[in-house]
Image: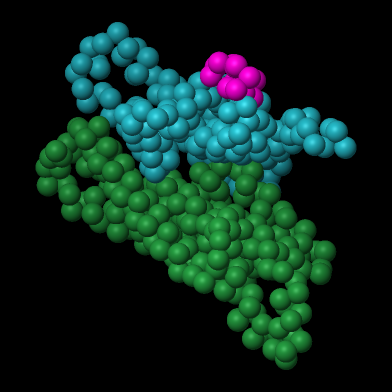
Chain colours: A cyan, B green
């Protein structure tokens, strides 16, 4: 082990950390926004909504993320309409393509997490809410959603950590996230063990601190424990 | 719908390689999982700690990083070790071998938790009862413990296998000619990335669907004779 190489690599890897954090934060945000309507559509009585949402979830959960990134980054350029459109400056950039793929991917997984959470709310509570005159929206906001999020938090926290790990695929489309920086440094220095160990330690620190925060949130939201 | 311009056989070869990689990783992964679970439930603190480090590392590090580490770092470590044993010609690791090691370690880490929970889920009094009517520990394991572990662990193992199946795509990064890599080659000739990557995606979807069907069939079989709700 050459510790000097490891120390020297640290500033560059930290630069990569910011890109990783940015990608993950934005993807989770957009994914969350996609997930809620998707989960509701999956539970909707309207068949077309259910089918479209179901197909979206099945596609993004059933194919590798790498295919999804390549499909958006390389694939879309096949169409002249895309290359001529005003969106091309965005869809040409590996950053935006990776972000779109990550967001759509986590959106599909999160939708399933939310769906499970919504289904866990006992039906008689919803009937009771309607019986006392709450509108469907109010019932969702006051009765269903708080219980959904509490129920879904462990699984959602897991998904957040999986997103950190998934963001390493950004390096396959030339982005300089932690993995991207590590791959470049490893081939420059011919010291893959030192460089990858350092990068892995940064990932571990990141995922570990995230899981601690999630655990704290879980304890805070756990009504039964707070009461006891 | 798809004009593969004669590259269909390329994708077919890639698919076969992907399936091979996934299945071999599954076999080794199950071994790692059982080993990990046994260590985690062991009386010896050292074994428990080692298994804990193993699962924490794998869960906290991106799979791509694990693959890169094993492929590029593993060669160096292996040659140093071989040199230390007095073997001085250069040893190379194939991308397939590195992929199998990385994916089976990943599968094993998840399977460790699944098996541990499954072993715990078998009521202790059943083991006592088996002992009381004179079964040997080996017979108890085979007749009482194993069928139930299998039943409890199946849903989790199926889901983990689906994860591994999709992660085989990452091994294309170190050059293994599986489905993604072959698709990439076809794209290089045809300049039709969307058509080919979408076709590859559909092949992955088909494989996912088949695994889900097999999983359902196995679960049904494992749950035969069990009344009430399926334990998940």
The magenta stretch is: A129-143
- Judging depth in this view, the residue of B182 and A6 nearest the camera is B182
Q: Quadrant of the N terminus of chain B?
A: top left
On the image, the x and y values in percent for residue A156 come to 60, 34
Count of numbered circles on the image: 0
Residue B147 against residue A65 in the figure, above or below:
below
On the image, the x and y values in percent for residue A147 come to 65, 30
User: Residue sitting at 54 percent across and 59 percent down?
Assistant: B230
Horizontal relation, residue B133 to residue B87: left or right: right
User: Residue sitting at 77 percent across and 58 percent down?
Assistant: B49
Q: Is residue B71 visible?
A: no
Residue furthest top as drawn: A86
On the image, the x and y values in percent for residue B183 come to 27, 43
User: Residue sitting at 15 percent across and 42 percent down?
Assistant: B4
Horizontal relation, residue B57 to residue B199: left or right: right
Q: Is residue B48 visible?
A: yes
- Judging depth in this view, the residue of A134 and B49 nearest the camera is A134
Q: Quadrant of the C terminus of chain B?
A: bottom right
Residue A93 against residue B147 in the figure, above or below:
above
- Judging depth in this view, the residue of B112 and B189 nearest the camera is B112
Horizontal relation, residue A71 to residue B215: left or right: left
User: Residue sitting at 38 percent across and 40 percent down?
Assistant: A58
Give the image quarter of residue A14. top right
Horizontal relation, residue B103 to residue A211: left or right: left
Give the image quarter of residue A5. top right
Residue furthest bottom as drawn: B134
Residue furthest front as drawn: A131
| Magenta span includes A138 | yes
On the image, the x and y values in percent for residue B59 come to 62, 47
Magenta span dominant secondary structure: helix
| Magenta span includes B11 | no
Residue B230 against residue B145 in the figure, above or below:
above
């Amino acid at each position: 082990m050459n510790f000097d190489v490891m120390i020297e690599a640290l500033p560059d890897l930290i630069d990569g950390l910011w890109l990783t954090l940015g990608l993950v934060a934005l993807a989770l945000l957009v994914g969350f926004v996609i997930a809620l309507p998707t989960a509701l559509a999956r539970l909707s009585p309207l068949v077309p909504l259910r089918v479209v949402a179901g197909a979206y979830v099945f596609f993004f959960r059933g194919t590798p993320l790498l295919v999804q990134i390549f499909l958006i980054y390389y694939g879309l350029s096949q169409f002249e309409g895309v290359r001529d459109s005003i969106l091309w400056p965005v869809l040409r950039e590996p950053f935006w393509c990776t972000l779109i793929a990550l967001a759509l991917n986590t959106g599909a997984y999160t939708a399933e997490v939310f769906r499970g959470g919504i289904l866990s709310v006992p039906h008689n509570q919803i009937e009771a809410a309607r019986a006392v005159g709450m509108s469907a929206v109010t019932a969702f906001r006051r009765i269903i959603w708080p219980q959904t999020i509490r129920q879904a938090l462990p699984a959602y926290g897991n998904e957040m950590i999986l997103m950190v790990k998934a963001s390493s695929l950004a390096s396959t489309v030339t982005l300089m996230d932690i993995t991207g920086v590590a791959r470049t440094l490893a081939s420059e220095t011919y010291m893959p063990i030192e460089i990858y160990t350092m990068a892995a330690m940064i990932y571990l620190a990141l995922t570990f601190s995230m899981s601690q925060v999630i655990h704290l949130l879980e304890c805070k939201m756990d009504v039964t424990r707070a009461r006891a | 719908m798809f004009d593969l311009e004669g590259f269909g056989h390329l994708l077919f070869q890639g698919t076969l390689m992907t399936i091979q990689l996934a299945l071999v990783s599954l076999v080794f992964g199950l071994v790692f999982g059982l080993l990990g679970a046994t260590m985690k439930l062991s009386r010896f603190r050292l074994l428990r700690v080692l298994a804990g480090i193993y699962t924490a590392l794998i869960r906290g590090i991106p799979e791509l990083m694990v693959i890169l580490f094993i492929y590029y770092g593993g060669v160096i470590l292996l040659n140093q070790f071989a040199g230390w044993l007095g073997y001085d010609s250069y040893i190379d690791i194939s991308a397939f071998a590195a992929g199998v090691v990385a994916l089976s370690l990943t599968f094993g880490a998840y399977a460790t938790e699944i098996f541990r929970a499954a072993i715990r889920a078998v009521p202790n009094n059943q083991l006592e009862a088996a002992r009381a009517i004179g079964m040997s520990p080996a017979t108890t394991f085979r007749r009482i413990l194993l069928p139930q572990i299998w039943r409890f662990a199946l849903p989790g193992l199926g889901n983990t296998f689906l994860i591994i199946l999709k992660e085989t795509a990452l091994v294309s990064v170190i050059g293994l000619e599986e489905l993604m890599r072959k698709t990439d080659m076809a794209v290089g000739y045809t300049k039709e990335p969307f058509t080919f990557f979408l076709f590859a995606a559909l092949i992955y979807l088909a494989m996912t669907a088949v695994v889900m069907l097999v999983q359902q069939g196995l679960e049904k079989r494992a749950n035969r004779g069990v009344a009430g709700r399926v334990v998940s």
